[in-house]
Image (cartoon, helix red, strand yellow):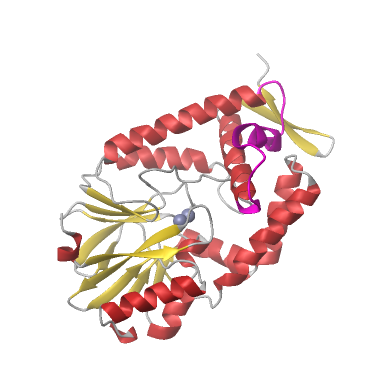
Amino acid sequence: MELEHRGIHRVRLPMPFRLDHVYCYAVEGREGWCIVDCGLNIPSARAAWEEFMAAHNIAPRDIRAVYLTHYHPDHYGLAGWWQEQTGAPVYMSAVDARLAGLYWRNCRPAAEAVRELFVRHGMPPPLAKDVIENMLELMATLSPHPALTTLEPGGEAMLGDLRCRVLLTPGHSDGHLCFYDPDHGILFSGDHLLPKITSNISLWPFAHPDPLKNFLQSLRENLNLKARILLPAHGEAFTNLAERVEQLLAHHRERLALMRDLAAPGATAFEVSRAVFGDRLTLHEERFAMAETLAHLVHLVGRGELTVKNEGRVRVFAARPR
Ligand SMILES: [Zn+2]
Ligand SMILES: [Zn+2]
């Protein structure tokens, strides 16, 4: 399918991480343009958008709407910048709008809650402090903040001339949205379905207590979609939805089995994280490794395969006694 015939343009925005890009989409329709996801608010990302605007002769007033799949910085970061220039509404789910408020507008208490969670699960306090400082640096790049308009899951959104269904796909974030055009079989999949890497599924304070359960359920529901092409935020467009869903379900089955075995004799989440992800991580990666490990361990507790209890100041997971 020639995406540009449908008005869809992919814009590659740089990121200063090992995951070095985020793909955003600009969709041209009869009434103007809309943007799907924004990129981090860093000079090189703003320059990439300005270059795209100039190349396609787009004036700020031509931008009619900004749609965000979810609240993470690489998607939300430039939303306020877009709104300042264009006056366009910025749409997101109500659930993720709440999390954006909690995490990005009021970042100290949120960062402190993450630090406490990590220390309680065995991360050495000096490392937890560094991880949180690194998180606060990223949070500082998110202003100006947009005024958000919430989108109802199950409703419709016009992306250019594409009439899309708004699909709630919780897991990667509690209020993650995908935009699905059933007439053309196009799915804007955000970070929910990625072609190569697996979406990070993380436990965070103030958010859902079992995000992996949500993610696995979202994946199973996606098997009913007749999407012919998926447009993800990281990696290339892809077509094998059902096969990819099966791969992701298998990945998490294996990861759950591995973490269950590592935790069975008694281990903190930090010990399991180190055993799985190693100790040569950047602070940014350390945060995601720990939160991802926690998401799997609490899911195993929820399924009755592990228990967790306090030992001194830390929480220790172990096999459920038979
Ligand atoms: Zn994300
Ligand atoms: Zn992302």
Q: Residue at x 38, y 84 (%)?
A: 86
Q: Residue 197: x percent and y percent?
A: 43, 43
Q: In the current view of this chain or complex, which residue is farthest to the right?
A: 312
Q: Position of residue 281 (x, y in %)?
A: 63, 45
Please state if 174 lies on the left or on the right of 232 as rendered: right
User: In this figure, what is the number of numbered marks?
Assistant: 0
Q: Quadrant of the N terminus?
A: bottom left
Left or right: 287 in relation to 21: right
Is residue 208 shown above or below 307? Answer: below
Which segment is the magenta one? 264-284
Is residue 181 magenta-colored?
Answer: no
Q: Nearer the viewer, residue 184 or 281?
A: 281
Q: Picture coordinates of residue 219 (x, y %)?
A: 37, 40
On the image, which quarter does residue 69 sit in?
bottom left
Image-based side of 31 in relation to 203, left or right: left
Q: Is residue 113 visible?
A: no
Q: Residue at x 20, y 47 (%)?
A: 228
**Place of residue 321 in the rendered image (x, y in percent of width and height, measured from the top left):** 68, 17
Between 197 and 266, the residue placed more toward the observer is 197
